[in-house]
């Protein structure tokens, strides 16, 4: 790790000093915080963090190292990482490298020694803010001017998606097509555990292309960016509603809601972490969930959708279900990774729905 002082500069002129590590560069991104206590590798490799600086609120990061099996995709999608302390000498029997070398391998800058408590409190008060890593105090004024016009890319879900269709699992007793807006590998693993044959298609796939695969069920994945930028996916989902059971996850929920005439909005500072309480309105039970989103569903046509889950921190919509069609979605991540697995049964709900709707005879 380098010893010189560098800075995270925010759009409002706030400046947070730290020590650079990883592949240090002066880059920009949207600054967000994540409250997970573990799972930093899964967070870094989650495509939903594209073009974002991740501020981890847990004070010590990297103490159990990095291992190949923990990645949610083949690369780091985040613009950068901000931590209070980066462990340089991890201890765990599965680790193959430390956090610094992992960031270097994936051309990602990091800033350590930051007062992440103060930074998180600032983001909670002011809301999510664009930021820039700078190497010298003399560059702060220029950084603030640059950040005044910063916006995340509008085609992030397309960038995060697979460019071509592929088969993630060739055998299975039921067929699932996963529409990839930036899907985590854990979604594929969760479906594979239920003996699904899994095809993955690009975010720009047409309804005709998807139906040509004769799926028993469709999963709309998580992904980065504003759901309203996904106009083609919204139209495709609308066209598929009466043809195949649909399960939306995170961005997938937002796209499903928009496809049916609902609306979405940007949260002040988002929900990111593995400890978010959500209430199941059908049972009254509270489950702890893994979450990573900056947008949420603000409304759905009441004649079409029922709200199934709500966030107990801010009462935002965390789940919806169509009243007459086999379509449902959640804003949280039932596959977790990282986070609790209390909602993993929702993949089984999709399998049961496919069994009923498609007349399958599954165990």
Image (cartoon, rainbow, N blue to C red):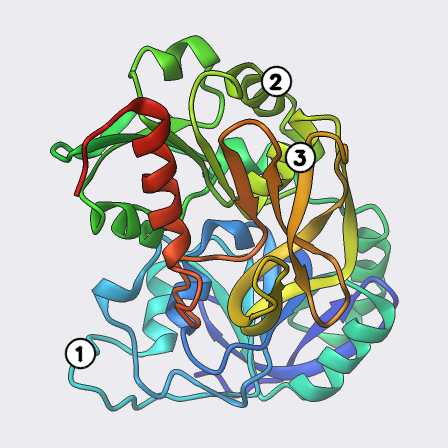
> In which quadrant of the rendered view does residue 208 lie?
top left
For the residues carrying marks 3 and 1, which lies nearer the camera in this image?
3
Q: Secondary structure at mark 3?
A: helix
309, above or below 66, in the image:
above
The reply to whether the C-beta atoms of the residues labelled 3 and 1 are less than 8 Å apart is no
CA–CA distance in space, label 2 to label 3:
11 Å
Q: What is the quadrant of the C terminus in the image?
A: top left
Side of 68 relative to 11 (left or right): left
| Residue 186 visible in the displayed image | yes
The reply to whether the C-beta atoms of the residues labelled 2 and 3 are less than 8 Å apart is no
Q: Which residue is mark 3?
A: 257
CA–CA distance in space, label 1 to label 2:
44 Å
Q: Which residue is mark 2?
A: 235
Q: Residue 28 location in percent, x, y?
A: 66, 56
Q: Residue 83 location in percent, x, y?
A: 55, 81
Tag of residue 94: 1
**Looking at the image, which is closer to me, 87 or 212?**
212
Tag of residue 325: none
CA–CA distance in space, label 3 to label 1:
41 Å
How many marks the image carries: the answer is 3
Side of 242 relative to 355 (left or right): right
> Which mark is first along the chain, 2 or 1?
1
Q: Residue 17 location in percent, x, y?
A: 69, 83
| Residue 226 visible in the displayed image | no
Residue visible at 59% across and 52% down? 331
Q: Residue 180 location in percent, x, y?
A: 42, 35
Tag 3: Cα neighbours inside 10 Å, few (<14), some, or many (≥20)? many
Q: Secondary structure at mark 2?
A: helix
Tag 2: Cα neighbours inside 10 Å, few (<14), some, or many (≥20)? some
Residue visible at 33% across and 62% down? 105
Residue visible at 17% across and 78% down? 94
């Amino acid at each position: 790790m380098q010893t010189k002082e560098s800075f995270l500069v925010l759009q409002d002129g706030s400046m947070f000093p730290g020590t650079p590590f990883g592949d240090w560069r002066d880059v920009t991104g949207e600054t967000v915080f994540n409250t997970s206590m573990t799972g930093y590798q899964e967070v870094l490799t989650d495509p939903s963090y594209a073009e974002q600086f991740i501020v981890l609120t847990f004070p010590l990061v990297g103490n159990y190292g990095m291992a190949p099996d923990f990645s949610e995709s083949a690369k780091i999608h985040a613009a950068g990482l901000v931590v209070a302390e980066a462990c340089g000498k991890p201890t765990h029997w599965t680790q193959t490298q430390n956090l610094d070398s992992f960031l270097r391998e994936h051309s990602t800058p990091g800033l350590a020694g930051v007062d992440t408590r103060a930074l998180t409190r600032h983001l909670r008060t002011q809301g999510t803010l664009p930021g820039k890593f700078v190497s010298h105090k003399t560059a702060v004024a220029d950084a603030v001017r640059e950040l005044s016009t910063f916006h995340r890319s509008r085609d992030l879900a397309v960038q995060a998606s697979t460019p071509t269709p592929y088969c993630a699992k060739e055998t299975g007793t039921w067929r699932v097509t996963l529409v990839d807006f930036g899907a985590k590998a854990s979604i594929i693993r969760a479906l594979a555990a239920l003996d699904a044959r899994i095809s993955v298609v690009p975010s720009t796939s047409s309804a005709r292309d998807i139906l040509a695969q004769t799926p028993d069920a469709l999963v709309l994945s998580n992904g980065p960016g504003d759901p309203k930028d996904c106009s083609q996916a919204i139209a495709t989902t609308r066209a598929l509603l009466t043809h195949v059971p649909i399960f939306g996850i995170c961005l997938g929920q937002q796209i499903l809601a928009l496809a049916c005439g609902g609306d979405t909005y940007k949260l002040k500072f988002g929900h990111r972490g593995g400890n978010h309480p959500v209430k199941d309105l059908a049972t009254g039970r509270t489950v702890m969930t893994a979450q990573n989103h900056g947008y949420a569903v603000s409304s759905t046509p009441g004649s079409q959708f029922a709200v199934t889950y709500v966030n107990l921190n801010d009462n935002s919509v965390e789940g919806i279900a169509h009243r007459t069609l086999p379509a449902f979605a959640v804003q949280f991540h039932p596959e977790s990774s990282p986070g609790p697995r209390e909602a993993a049964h929702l993949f089984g709900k999709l399998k049961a729905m496919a069994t009923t709707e498609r007349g399958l005879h599954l165990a």
